[in-house]
Image: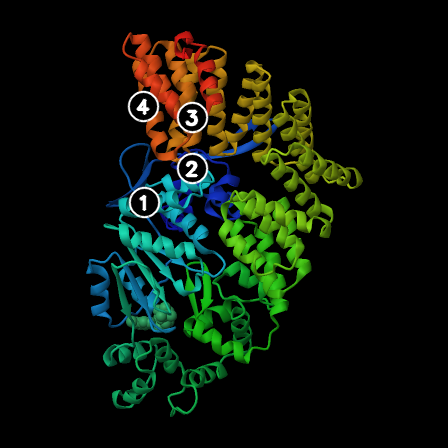
Amino acid sequence: MEVPRLLKLLSNEVNLQILSVLRTGSFNPRELARILQRDESDVSRRLRALERAGLVEGRWVRVGGKNVRMYSLRVDGISIRFQPGGVSLESSKSGEYSFLTVKSGTPEVEDFFGREREIQLLRSSPERVIAVYGIAGIGKTSLAVKAFPEAFWYQAEETEGFDYFVWQLGIHLNALGFPQLLEYLRAGGRNERDEFELALRGIEETGTTVVIDDLHRCGDEKMGRFLTFLAEGLKNGKVILLSREKPSLGAENVLYIRLEGLDVESAYRLFEARGGKVDPREFAEVYRLTRGHPLAIVLFAQASSSGVDASGNFFDFLMSEVYGRLTEKERLLLQILSLFDEPLEYEAIKALYPGRNVFAPLYALARKGLVERRGELYFIHDLIRGFIERVREVEPADYYGAYIDYLLRKGSARDFLRAFKYAVLLGDEGRITAIIEERLRRFKRVVQDFQGAYLSLLSKAPQIPQVRAEIGTVYFQRGFFEKALGIWLDVEDKLDGIFRADVLSSIADVYLELNDFEKAEEYLGKLKEIVGKNPDPEVELWYYVIKTKLHYYRGEVEEGLESAFKELDVLKRLGHYPELEALVYLHIGDIYSEMERPEEAIRYYLLALQVAKAYSLSFLEHTCYMELTKAYFHIGEYEKAVEEGDRAIDYFTRIRNYRRAVDTLGYHFLALIGLGELEKAEEDAKEMLRMGQGSNYPLAWAGYIFLAVIEKLRGGNWKEYLRLGRERLGDYPWLYEAVLEETARVVDVEELKEK
Ligand code: ADP
């Protein structure tokens, strides 16, 4: 491939993000798209281009009768050589290298004037969190870009909040060699403390500067808590907050800078650079009127040089001057853009603009300073939007509908959330419920990955029963079972079709979690009626999922197994559903384990593993290793148990899921005992106790019993450890019994049982 084409591929931010995620393993495009929050077809297209360039390698793997495409990195790094004959690029498979970072999301400033003092202050102040505030158009964004061109840029938006921010930060830190935050989020981790700590560590270790633009738009309290946390903990990284109003963070060490207009000289230079023509003496009047407000000066340069009518709103006067000179097409486009308070990508603008050639007016508006470009995104300044809103003739409803359709066609979680926002703005109940149906069928993960953002959108239309049911789902995800149940019971008879089915299966599920099997069965019965009347494979699947769970909880393993196989049948009819397929295999494995048929269990765990790996579902993949550790231990294959256990322990510790890490450590320990590896086993026991300190997960205290086991095998003093173990597990006698029962498979425990 020629050098310029390759460089072009490498100078694209999204491509670099893809490459940096691939650095951590092989991926299927679908999961890559989820991680990067982009649509799958876009990611596939980029992967193909990167493959043609020899940077990545695609291969087909066969999973359960289907071919699945997996991509991995082909090179470790690229070096650029300047040679007599020209420039050449070489790729290497080993050696140190660091990723280029290209930031298309960061705004660009071409000609920047003045502000030397502020830049100096921003760069050298000892405070690690700095808030720059001032009125719209005063130059906050431009200043931050100038001072920190390499920063991680986050444009705050009303609907997105902390969840979305932290995910983007995770992607960015991953590209800089800090994968832990992204890995944690992908695995569904949502503990506030963990998120904050990992983000802080990532910012510190990479020395990142984070800029949050338009912070005043973000109404998420979690963001406020995060910023306070950073202000107290940052030593190396930096955070710059841009806001209309002075943000109040409950921390001391924050520097506040209130931004005023430019000084006269800088203002004049800006005016001239933007094509303004008056002599310096006349400019004094312009300066008096604008007080150095840069956006006003940019517009002034566009307006006629004739006198100024300074009565009334000065900015509006300027805008009407400038607006009056636009072509019909430019005006229409500006009006359309003013309907959206978020940057739009070129494809979206194309989909919205009724004419054929949107490029020409868009380009003209950008040149006149009325539209700004950020990488692939275009937007208009709030001040300009404010003016356009007053002269606007287009109807929001005509465009929001088209935008919603466009977003749903694209299909990332972010697009889904935006579509929802515009449906709420339209107040169109039909559309809102149609979008919720999409959530139930296609965007299942939104309630896990973007809880906060989704909840805040939902709470804008609480009168709609489908919306209330969704609010219940978010509560359920957060562990508020009773609250969720209350909402669902309340809306149950106001719904029908797939919405009612969803609520019925949720109610049954929550009763299962609350151990009320009779109620669970009652609601499962209601769900069955719906399945009988109106076959919809999606709903049928929910029915069998709950049914399997009910039987399993009741210890009715045969029925559970039968129902699980029904799930598989339905999944085949539904088509592409790898997450669930892997999960069902895993559950079948669990049921076989329960039936004490470990060989069959292993067969299904391995199937689950195959699917999870093919689709890069790391959490599921490692859950499989965890289950395999246990199953291999049960059939006496200790070496295999240790090997699988290593993988699971490493992963669950990294993503701070200490429960799973401890569960695996227990079996890993016993397998090591089975192999006679006492020293390594001792490490496991100690690790369990360390995790117990942090997590308070009772099984971790089995570490003491395990230390007793080791001392006993060594002929040392084991009684003290045993006493400690008994004491710590005092409230969980059944757990103590279970630990002894499993331990008995490898050592004689009779003495440990004595009172
Ligand atoms: P804010 O973020 O405060 O709303 P912006 O940074 O977007 O303001 O600035 C508004 C406009 O003024 C932009 O078009 C920008 O190019 C211009 N501008 C602001 N500050 C300067 C400066 N110091 N030099 C040149 N142009 C500036």
Mark found first going from the N terminus, 3 or 4 = 4
What numbered label is drawn on residue 202?
A: 1
Mark nearer the viewer, 3 or 2? 3
Looking at the image, which is closer to me, 105 or 591?
591
Amino acid at dot 2: Val
Q: Is mark 4 within 8 Å of ligand 1?
A: no
Per the image, the residue denoted by label 3 is 699
Amino acid at dot 1: Gly
| Secondary element at image label 1 | helix
- At a point 36% along the width and 17% down the height, the residue shown is 706
Percent across and percent down for residue 294 are 33, 76
User: Seen in the image, is 259 located left or right of residue 406?
Assistant: left
Amino acid at dot 4: Lys
Amino acid at dot 3: Leu
Rendered position, 740 above or below 443:
above
Mark found first going from the N terminus, 3 or 2 = 2
Rendered position, 718 above or below 73:
above
The part of the image, by quadrant, that contains residue 716 is top left
Per the image, the residue denoted by label 4 is 686
- At a point 78% along the width and 37% down the height, the residue shown is 532
| Secondary element at image label 3 | helix
For the N terminus, the quadrant is: top left
For the residues marked 3 and 2, what is the alpha-carbon distance in whole angstroms?
A: 43 Å
The reply to whether dot 3 and dot 1 touch (C-beta < 8 Å) is no
For the C terminus, the quadrant is: top left
Farthest right residue? 533
User: Seen in the image, is 545 located left or right of residue 477?
Assistant: right
Per the image, the residue denoted by label 2 is 56
Percent across and percent down for residue 684 are 34, 21
